[in-house]
Amino acid sequence: MMLGHSPAFAQACELLRQYAACDMHVLIEGETGTGKELAAREIHQAGAGADCPFVAVNCGALPDTLVENELFGHQRGAYTDARCAQTGLVERAEHGTLFLDEIDTLSSKAQAVLLRFLETHECRRVGDNKSRVINTRVISATNARLEEKVATGQFRRDLHYRLNVLHVQLPPLRERRGDVPLLANHFLQATANRMNRPPKRWSVDALDALERYHWPGNVRELEHVVLRAFLRAKSEVIAHEALDRLIAEPAGASEAARMPHKDESFAEAKRHAIRAFELGYLVRLMERTHGNVTAAARLSGTERRQLGKLLQKHGIFTERFRCDTSA
């Protein structure tokens, strides 16, 4: 499941929902760790072929000498070691989705083979003299700018046209303002569940540090940092110290967080300041009331339902603040 409520992320998700309603090929571009395969699965699961296979292929791992064999399979006796017939990746994805990750790494030969299939929809196993028409949707992904690869002659323009019928650019985490706390809390809860350990929660300083970090590895890096911080923390509250050497804050990050971002309007800066204030206030409020929303609403003078919406907006799970006070 893809999580986030920032404008950039919401816009990308809206495109994914629109693309799921048709069966055209999709090209997903985005930096490493932005969730391109997850986005492809979102399109698949929301589409008409959701009950059919989703077959993921790492194009960089396709050996040049076996491209046809990997994509289309082979008949028994097609070559010396072909003791039985084998279904190719394309055929396995029939009526479903063939996800081609790292599409920019395809060799020239592989590009030609894939282009032929996209043009004809015909699949012929190695060693067979008959072709079958295969109906499958192709979703490709790359962390490179494919247009630039085309311009330098590293990728076929005609293949790019075939793959890029529909396009979505996944935003990097640094452009998804406000999504870091939501994702950090989600991964924290998921880590506790996976390891069958008591839940933990972030201190305000730790969450502030996570929000200030530039996340070159995007969501994947955040998930790994959360896991390591969870293992490091000795108490139920993960303090800023647990992030030492896991993330490197640039000098003056605390001051920079209070300054407007480049090209940021007054209205945007105001929204960012309000969001930061709300997050800090809500975390401290939950700490005081041990996650009791009714008590928190009473203490803050807020209607309970409205407070619940604010907690959901910032990805704050009240379970993490609850503790046994009977001791």
Image (cartoon, rainbow, N blue to C red):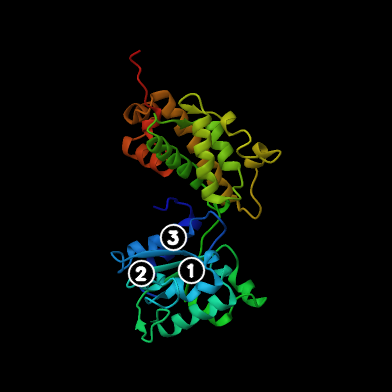
| Residue 164 placement, left or right of 256 | left
Give coordinates of residue 106: x percent, y percent: 56, 71
User: In which quadrant of the rendered view does residue 128 lie?
Assistant: bottom left
Circle 2 — which element?
helix
The residue identified by callout 2 is 92
Whole-angstrom CA distance, mark 3 to mark 2, is 20 Å
Quadrant location of the C terminus in the rendered image: top left
Residue at (62% x, 33% y) in the render: 244
Number of numbered labels in the structure image: 3
Question: Nearer the N terminus, badge 3 or badge 1?
Answer: 3
Residue at the far top: name it: 327
Give coordinates of residue 250: x percent, y percent: 69, 41
Q: Type of residue at label 1?
A: Ser
Dot 3 alpha-carbon crowd within 10 angstroms: few under 14, some 14 to 19, many 20 or more:
many
The residue identified by callout 3 is 39
Q: Type of residue at label 3?
A: Ala
